[in-house]
Image (cartoon, helix red, strand yellow):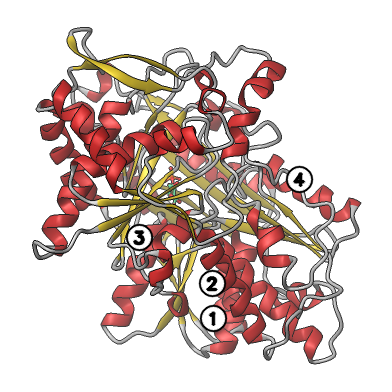
């Protein structure tokens, strides 16, 4: 990304410890980074932790030694490499920004450097000022939070400098969840400096430890693709004009514009209040329930102590609640098989009533019932649909494209709702649900198999913790009405959901450097593959193309279905197959194989293996 020529800016603090080579021993990493991780714990008391003190100054007053917190943080020279607009635009990942924030993985140079981060934050400030147009006496406030990643502190400092340089005030929340950040733009509470005019969450969700990124919010929701592109274009222009003096000035301004607030206390007490209210204003509606949480060392550890315990639940056996940006136990991702195995084991070992698992930044979740049955993917959607349709009979449930046929039957025949299977992407399903409401079709739930989900009643906030709150409400009200405890009430709600014997996802990579692309984009290439598949389907009487479909090619036959589509962000064609037997799944695989084999830039090895070719 960067040419070796560039301006040298002095006196910029850099975090060194937690950018260590991945090959360092785990012990070394633990020794080095433990104090750092400590700093990631949420602020436990007080409303305004401190005022008008920048992060850097905080170290002077904090009992945490900055040198330790930053693990050999040193004042050193940072070279501002030249970075062109196209490099900035490559950081866009749908409606997020994602990049490499620390060294340590071969072949993955740092793309989100501190100056690049500063430019992006300054660009968000400029974008926000354009949107909100405050009068000259009003300063806009932007809240900033982060997940447990090793680069979190470094990025938070750079974001704060960028925002300050962009002329807005900064409120740092420290370790936070993505939904809490959006919520901070809606909360009305002056004591906590809310509502924020805009918000930035520093996260790369479940991606490897060396990555990081940003999600942006206003009270209208998460920023979409068009706005992200606009921000990156602005950032490229801002970056071009960075000077040594300008950056030093931003650093000084950050010293006057940063405040720190324990916002997670507000957010978690709202979750607690929601469950109490649903249970008929009982103080401890979960008394007697044993619920284990697996935060995967992400940001979701708060849920055990700050949500479940105040509601009366026992949380012993909860695991991986401490933030650790190396994710040493499993990837914090409810779609990951090892992650689901880990929480299932915890439920069974502890004889718990329920298990709850979050992704790194808590916008995704899944559950496990007391028998060890996973309530994720289609099952979680079925369960949430059952809950929402009880409250809103007949409503439309918007889901992503890889949902099963059995789910449609369940929602429409058993629950009496409408299943609107739309595209992949949490923002896509949420926006579609909002659109349906605006044209007169009532929808109360937008949810993905990935574990993202948003409810109309919760301002369409994409919130894994709130999804779990809806399950807790169900447990609490069942107990209050004398149905006893345990998670049977939840398991019973998904009774009747037909599940396929075989369910597979294969991801076929497009090699962008391959000559078969003939200089074209991977998207155009992927579209050509899909067109070829469509032609083949049209001539096969055993297969039927789905009459309504919003992405890729979805086909029914052999008692099941498959979907081949372009990935939302990557040069990849994901193939999902569900079938009643392995033989039927292979028949689908062979159909797809016949359509893709002439596309030599496509890596079909996973498919070849599946169909035994
Ligand atoms: O299209 P894919 O590569 O399967 O990725 C799709 C996924 O991309 C991101 O992770 C989004 O946050 C998810 O909402 C979406 O489901």
- Earlier in the chain: of badge 3 and badge 2, it is 2
Residue at image location 50% in from the left, 36% down from the top:
207
Crowding near the residue tagged with mark 2, few <14, some 14–19, many ≥20 C-alpha atoms within 10 Å: many
Residue at image location 59% in from the left, 79% down from the top:
274
- Earlier in the chain: of badge 3 and badge 4, it is 4
Does the rendering let one see residue 258? yes
Label 4 to label 1, Cα distance in Å? 31 Å
Helix, strand or loop at mark 2: helix
Residue at image location 56% in from the left, 77% down from the top:
411
Label 2 to label 4, Cα distance in Å? 27 Å
Q: According to the image, label 2 marks what residue?
A: 408
Q: According to the image, label 3 marks what residue?
A: 428
Of circles 1 and 3, the one toward us is 3
- Earlier in the chain: of badge 1 and badge 3, it is 1
Locate residue 190: give its quadrant: bottom left
Location of residue 494 with respect to 578 vertically, above or below? below
Helix, strand or loop at mark 3: helix
Locate residue 529: give its quadrant: top left
Q: According to the image, label 1 marks what residue?
A: 412
Q: According to the image, label 4 marks what residue?
A: 341
Location of residue 6 with respect to 360 vertically, above or below? above
Helix, strand or loop at mark 4: helix
Helix, strand or loop at mark 1: helix
Label 3 to label 2, Cα distance in Å? 19 Å
Locate residue 100: give its quadrant: top left
Tell me: 559 left or right of 394: right
């Amino acid at each position: 990304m960067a040419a070796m020529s560039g301006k040298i800016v002095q006196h910029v603090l850099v975090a060194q410890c937690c950018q260590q080579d991945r090959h360092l021993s785990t012990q070394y990493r633990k020794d080095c980074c433990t104090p750092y991780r400590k700093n990631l714990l949420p602020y436990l008391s007080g409303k305004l932790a401190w005022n008008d003190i920048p992060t850097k100054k905080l170290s002077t007053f904090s009992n945490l030694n900055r040198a330790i917190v930053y693990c050999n943080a040193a004042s050193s020279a940072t070279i501002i490499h030249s970075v062109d607009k196209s490099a900035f635009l490559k950081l866009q990942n749908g409606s997020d920004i994602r990049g490499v924030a620390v060294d340590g993985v071969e072949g993955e140079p740092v793309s989100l450097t501190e100056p690049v981060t500063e430019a992006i934050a300054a660009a968000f400030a400029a974008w926000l000022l354009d949107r909100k147009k405050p009068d000259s006496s009003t300063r806009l406030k932007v809240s900033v939070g982060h997940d447990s990643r090793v680069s979190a502190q470094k990025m938070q400092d750079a974001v704060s400098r960028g925002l300050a340089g962009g002329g807005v005030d900064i409120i740092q929340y420290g370790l936070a969840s993505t939904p809490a950040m959006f919520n901070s733009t809606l909360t009305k509470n002056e004591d906590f400096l809310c509502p924020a005019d805009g918000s930035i969450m520093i996260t790369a969700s479940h991606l490897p430890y060396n990555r990081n990124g940003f999600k942006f919010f206003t009270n209208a929701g998460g920023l979409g693709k068009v706005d992200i592109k606009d921000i990156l274009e602005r950032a490229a222009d801002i970056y071009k004009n960075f000077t040594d003096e300008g950056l030093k000035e931003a650093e000084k301004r950050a010293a006057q514009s940063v405040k720190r607030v324990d916002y997670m206390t507000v957010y978690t007490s709202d979750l607690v209040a929601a469950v109490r209210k649903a249970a008929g204003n009982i103080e401890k509606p979960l008394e007697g329930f044993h619920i284990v949480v697996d935060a995967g060392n992400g940001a979701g550890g708060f849920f055990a102590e700050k949500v479940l315990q105040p509601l009366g639940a026992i949380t012993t056996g909860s695991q991986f609640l401490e933030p650790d940006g190396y994710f040493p136990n499993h990837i914090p991702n409810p779609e990951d098989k090892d992650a689901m195995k880990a929480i299932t084991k915890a439920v069974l070992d502890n004889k718990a009533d329920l298990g709850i698992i979050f992704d790194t930044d808590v916008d995704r979740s899944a559950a496990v019932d007391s028998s060890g049955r996973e309530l994720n993917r289609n099952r979680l959607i079925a369960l949430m649909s059952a809950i929402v349709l009880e409250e809103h009979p007949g409503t439309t449930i918007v889901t992503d494209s890889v949902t099963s046929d059995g789910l449609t039957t369940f929602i429409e025949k058993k629950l009496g709702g409408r299943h609107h299977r739309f595209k992949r992407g949490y923002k896509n399903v949420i926006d579609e649900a909002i659109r349906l409401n605006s044209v007169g079709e009532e929808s109360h739930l937008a949810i993905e198999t990935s574990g993202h989900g948003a409810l109309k009643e919760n301002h369409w906030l994409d919130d894994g913790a709130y999804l779990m709150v809806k399950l807790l409400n169900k447990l609490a009200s069942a107990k209050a009405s004398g149905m006893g405890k345990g998670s049977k009430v939840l398991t019973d709600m998904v009774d009747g959901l037909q599940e396929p014997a075989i369910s597979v996802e294969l991801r076929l990579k497009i090699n962008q450097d391959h000559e078969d692309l003939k200089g074209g984009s991977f998207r155009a290439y992927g579209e050509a593959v899909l067109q070829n598949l469509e032609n083949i389907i049209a001539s096969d009487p055993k297969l039927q193309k789905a009459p309504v479909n919003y992405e890729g090619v979805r086909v029914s036959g052999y008692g099941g279905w498959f979907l081949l589509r372009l990935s939302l962000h990557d040069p990849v064609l994901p193939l999902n197959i569900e079938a009643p037997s392995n033989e039927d799944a292979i028949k689908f695989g062979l159909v797809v194989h016949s359509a893709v084999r002439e596309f030599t830039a496509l890596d079909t090895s996973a498919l070849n293996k599946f169909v035994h070719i």
